[in-house]
Image (cartoon, grey):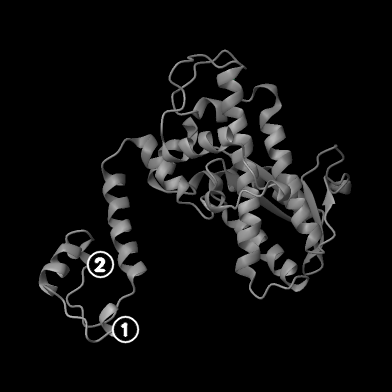
Amino acid sequence: MSKAMNPSITWLNPEEEITAFNNLVTTDDQIQDIDNPIKQFILSNKIDKQKFLHINNNCDMRTKALLNSTSGKWAGAWVMTPPITALGLGLSPQEWAIAAAYRLGLPINKEKEWCSQCAGKMDSFGDHALNCCKNGHWIRRHHAILKQLMRDCQSAGLQPQWEKAGILGDVDGTACRPADILLPDWSRGKDACLDIAITNPLQAKYINNTAKQGGSAAAHYAEKVKKKKYASKVEAAGKVFIPVIVEATGGWGSEAVDIIKRVALSKLRRSDQSSPSTIINQMVQRLGTVLQRYNARMILTRLTG
Ligand SMILES: [Zn+2]
């Protein structure tokens, strides 16, 4: 690339440069010559890919699961979020440190051995804290994500309704509410019922599969828990059921990705932005920051009591 920009550049020893690069990447990514320009970021990505594979092949199961899940769709968006408190984008220094340590797999808890909320055994990485269901922290985190997505839907002009009752009508006479958010006239004249949930890919029942395949926890939760419980009933009531699942490590499930993209397109029509990618980026940064804030608080609460 440099030579293409400036033909006067001469390589000191191109063969050695190529050999040095090829030693850092997989066989498929090796290059044979430097005559065809390749952008720097492409070369860097090839080296990063090999590093990822090397670490993934030589680490314990939890680290594999952590690597795979934190490589999920938009899982790292919060890291690049500008810390503008007035826009609700700030994390306190303590929250940021905890969230970053959790993402990097660094020990968080060296001294305290017992959870202050359930008296269960804490672990050094904070996994117990995210799995601990005591004292309504899961619900507060869920509602915070729900509120943020609700705001996005409102600003997109989608006329969302919050936890609308009686959706199932005669299909189910109970107080069952399968829609955290109801979006009118979403698909072919049918309303959409968005059911938002957060699941931890590092919990015992998901960690093995997550170590093999990132995103598997969100996919399993959407299909085997949410759709199994609600999809047929919601469809019988003439509506569309959409599970919006985000993994606690930040990656979004496939239906959630579709929803976020479509909400962003609706926002685009009402904004002065020229590209949906900017709006998507803003949405996932904000949602990711909310998720990490509540994750960090769950861990901090259990460390400090
Ligand atoms: Zn606990």
**Residue type at numbered disc 1:** Met
CA–CA distance in space, label 2 to label 1: 23 Å
- Label 2, residues with CA under 10 Å away: few <14, some 14-19, many ≥20: some
Image position, residue 133 (x, y; %): 63, 25
Residue 179 appears in view: no
Identify which residue is drawn at 42% across, 28% down: 107
Residue 216 appears in view: yes
User: Does residue 121 sit above or below 100 in this rendering?
Assistant: above
- The reply to whether the C-beta atoms of the residues labelled 2 and 1 are less than 8 Å apart is no
User: Does residue 281 sit above or below 230 in this rendering?
Assistant: below
Task: Please tell me the numbered disc located at residue 5.
Answer: 1
Q: Quadrant of residue 94?
A: top right
**Residue type at numbered disc 2:** Asp
Answer left or right for 45 relative to 181: left
Task: Specify which label sits upstream in the sequence, 2 or 1.
Answer: 1
Which residue in the rendered view is the most extreme toward the bottom?
Answer: 7
Q: Quadrant of residue 135?
A: top right
- Label 1, residues with CA under 10 Å away: few <14, some 14-19, many ≥20: few
Quarter in which the N terminus is drawn: bottom left
Image position, residue 184 (x, y; %): 83, 61
Closer to us: 188 or 303: 303
Which residue in the rendered view is the most extreme toward the front?
Answer: 8
Q: Which residue is mark 2?
A: 29
User: Does residue 54 sit above or below 61 in this rendering?
Assistant: below
Image position, residue 240 (x, y; %): 74, 58
Camera-side mark, 2 or 1: 1
Task: Please tell me the numbered disc located at residue 23.
Answer: none
Closer to us: 50 or 191: 50
Please, what secondary structure does the residue beneath circle 1 have?
helix
Image position, residue 18 (x, y; %): 16, 69
